[in-house]
Image (cartoon, rainbow, N blue to C red):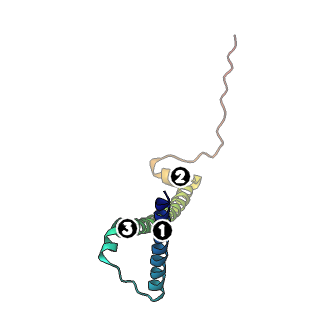
Amino acid sequence: MNRIIKEEESTGKETVDNESRNFTETVKRFADFDFRIKPEQVLTQLPFLAYIFVLIMLFIYNSHRSEKIIREADRLQQEVKDLRSEYISELSLLMGESKQSTVAKKLAPFGIKELKTPPSKITYRHEQ
């Protein structure tokens, strides 16, 4: 029974020593700007690299889409301004064309003349 406990304790210390040694080596490599990667490490990191690639592609797509939406919004705002100015100009033309004097001038060739006296109101009383 003592033998099993000693073996478990010794393997526990070895894993801690290996982990601390690996961490220390990694920190040294980063401090020395040594970024050489072993082929085995590349293969283990492929899913993470694929994830990063997908995130980059989504970021690029999102940027292009937002720029397209901004351009479309600017174009629509300019179109609204143009239509508003066209509406105002057409409204002023209509106001000018609907004046009593302008209507009278346009109807004169057809023989329709402007009344000189105001119209009278006809009332009807129904008696029982």
Tell me the tag on residue 103. Answer: 2
Image location of residue 28, percent across then percent down: 47, 85
Q: Could you tell me how far apart the alpha carbons at marks 2 and 3 are, in whole angstroms?
A: 66 Å
Q: Considering the image in quadrants, where does the C terminus appear?
A: top right
User: Label 3 neighbourhood size at 10 Å, few (<14), some (14-19), many (20+)?
Assistant: few
Upstream in sequence: badge 3 or badge 1: 1
- The answer to whether any part of residue 36 appears in the image is yes
Q: Residue 91's image quarter? A: bottom right
Mark 3 vs mark 1, foreground winner is 1
Q: CA distance from mark 3 to mark 1?
A: 48 Å
User: Which of 13 and 107 lies nearest the eye of the viewer?
Assistant: 13
Q: CA distance from mark 1 to mark 2?
A: 110 Å
Is 25 displayed left or right of 44 in the figure?
Answer: right
Image coordinates of residue 45 in percent, x first then y, are: 36, 69
How packed mark 2 is, by other alpha carbons closer than 10 Å (few <14, some 14-19, many 20 or more), is: some
Dot 2 amino acid type: Val
Query: Marks 2 and 3: which is nearer the front?
Result: 3
Q: Is residue 76 visible?
A: no
Q: Mark 1: give few (<14), some (14-19) or many (20+) Cα within 10 Å.
A: few
Residue at screen point 46% across, 71% down: 14
Q: Kindly identify the amino acid type of the residue bearing the numbered disc 1.
A: Ser
In this rendering, the label closer to the viewer, 1 or 2:
1
Residue 38 picture location, percent across and down: 32, 78
Q: Which residue is mark 1?
A: 10
Callout 3 secondary element: helix
Can you identify the residue that label 3 sits on?
57
Q: Earlier in the sequence, mark 2 or mark 3?
A: 3
What SS does tag 2 mark?
helix
